[in-house]
Amino acid sequence: MAGEDGSVRIARLPDAIDIANCGAAGASLLAAVSVPGLVIADMTGTVCCDSAGMRMLLTVHDRACSSGATLRVAVTPGTSVARVMAILGVNRILAVYDSVQDAQAAGAARGLPPARGPRRPLDSSPRRAAAQVTGTAPHTDVPPAVS
């Protein structure tokens, strides 16, 4: 799954990523980001990625940050994977590019950017977690009942 290209490791992800196979895909990516350097997750051939797959990508991103690796994700624009990333806001956390070539060129053009620090874990409360993702405060004030 992962190939070497100089200091760049490219991991081609499966056509579909779901709860059944995200463990194997995640293990491959985690191994690739365990050492410093650039890792590109190639999702250009991925046509379906559910929430388990998105969570796996965020977990790999956190590991990359802590190990000094840089994770970039290549996703074909306009696909369902790109739309799901945009809806969930994953594309605001991960470095997403239109192609593997674009992801490689971004590093070559300006050098490898420093890895961002790990994200704060999300609060277990769904409303508070949504607020942390969107940057808005949850509404905790409930107006009194009108009698």
Image (tube, rainbow, N blue to C red):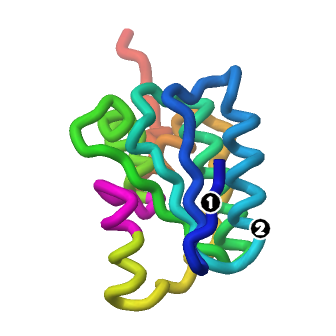
How far across and down, in percent of the image, does residue 62 sit? 66, 62
* Residue to which mark 2 is pinned: 34
Q: Quadrant of residue 20?
A: top right
Q: Earlier in the sequence, mark 1 or mark 2?
A: 1
How far across and down, in percent of the image, does residue 49 sit? 49, 30
Q: Secondary structure at mark 1?
A: strand
How far across and down, in percent of the image, does residue 90 sit? 44, 48
Q: Nearer the viewer, mark 1 or mark 2?
A: 1
94 and 7: which one is in front? Answer: 7
How far across and down, in percent of the image, does residue 115 sit? 57, 78
Residue type, numbered disc 2: Ser
Residue type, numbered disc 1: Gly
Q: Which mark is residue 3?
A: 1
Residue 13 in the image: above or below residue 69: above
Residue range (magenta): 93-103
Q: Secondary structure at mark 2?
A: loop
Q: Residue at x 32, y 87 (%)?
A: 109
Q: Residues within 10 Å of mark 2 (few under 14, many from 20)?
A: some
Question: Residue extending furthest bottom?
Answer: 111
Q: Is residue 101 magenta?
A: yes
Q: Give how far apart the Cα atoms at labels 1 and 2 are.
A: 15 Å
Q: Are marks 1 and 2 in contact (CB under 8 Å)?
A: no
Question: Residue extending furthest top?
Answer: 147
Residue 79 in the image: above or below residue 75: above
Q: Quadrant of residue 54?
A: top right
